[in-house]
Amino acid sequence: MDTVTDIRMISVPAGRVTLSDRRTQRSWTVALTPYRIAASVVTQDLYARVTGERPATAQGGRLPVESVSWLDAVRFCNALSAQAGLTPVYRLEAAAEDTEGTESVGRDTAADGYRLPTEAEWEHACRAGTTGARYGELDDIAWHRGNSRERLHEVGSREPNAWGLYDTLGNVWEWCWDVYDAEVYGSYRVLRGGGWFDEHWSCRASVRRRSHPTFRIDDTGFRVARSVL
């Protein structure tokens, strides 16, 4: 547990993960050093405590925060780092007008603060040493369209994976750091994990979704990570 923020952080071992994209039929392997990642996605209570805001459409302190953009998540990470006395990871600068009013975000890899996981880190943590589509039976581990009654559920109310992470599949999609495909989609960022309104085939460890970094919708949230320096 990070004592200042009360976030339960899971230590993830080094490893290798093979990512794949169904659209391009491409796969690539990423080697990872150890890192830490939150056991649960950011809740509405935590988001409000850090930012003073409750942007979610379905209100509840233990519900995942949703209707947050990638840029909202980046700003949250910096604010959380500052509150915890850590060095913020991200550098935000006003962008040129031709980027649709978004911001240019740089990353300090030597900073010890909170950040978004890379999609390789996310998938490695989600799989927790497994190699199948999911780390358990879907209804036991995830809220999806078939069992959610088409609504959000409190974090940690399904079974965790072997490393102690909850809701990596289902409930809300999770923003990752990475650009999806700059040549085709520009600044669009990666989303992982599936959400409460998704069919079972979207709630798999390998599934990738993309969206503009300013986009907000009621099935998208995020969890935080930290580098081991």
Image: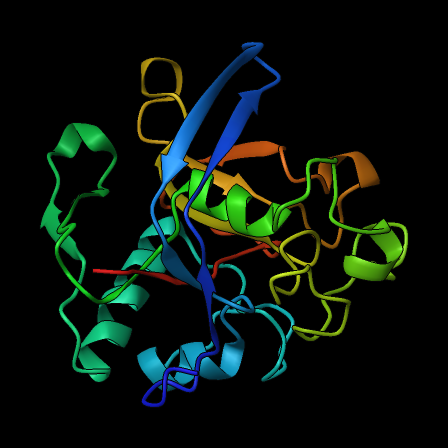
To which quarter of the image does residue 172 belong?
bottom right
Q: Residue at x 84, y 50 (%)?
A: 138
The N terminus appears in which quarter of the rendering? bottom left
Would residue 109 be found to the left or right of residue 143 on screen? Answer: left
Name the one closer to the observer, 26 or 186.
26
Name the one closer to the observer, 133 or 33.
33
Residue 102 lies, in percent from the top left, at: 23, 42
Would residue 88 be found to the left or right of residue 24 on screen? Answer: left
Q: Is residue 69 visible?
A: yes
Q: Residue at x 19, y 65 (%)?
A: 112
Residue 176 lies, in percent from the top left, at: 42, 46
Residue 67 lies, in percent from the top left, at: 51, 59
Q: Residue at x 80, y 52 (%)?
A: 144
Residue 7 lies, in percent from the top left, at: 44, 79
Q: Is residue 215 visible?
A: no
On screen, residue 130 above or below 152:
above
Name the one closer to the observer, 206 or 151.
206
On screen, residue 69 above or below 151:
above
Query: How is the model colour-coded?
Result: rainbow
Would residue 106 be found to the left or right of residue 153 on screen? Answer: left
The C terminus appears in which quarter of the rendering? bottom left
Q: Residue at x 89, y 58 (%)?
A: 147
Picture mark count: 0
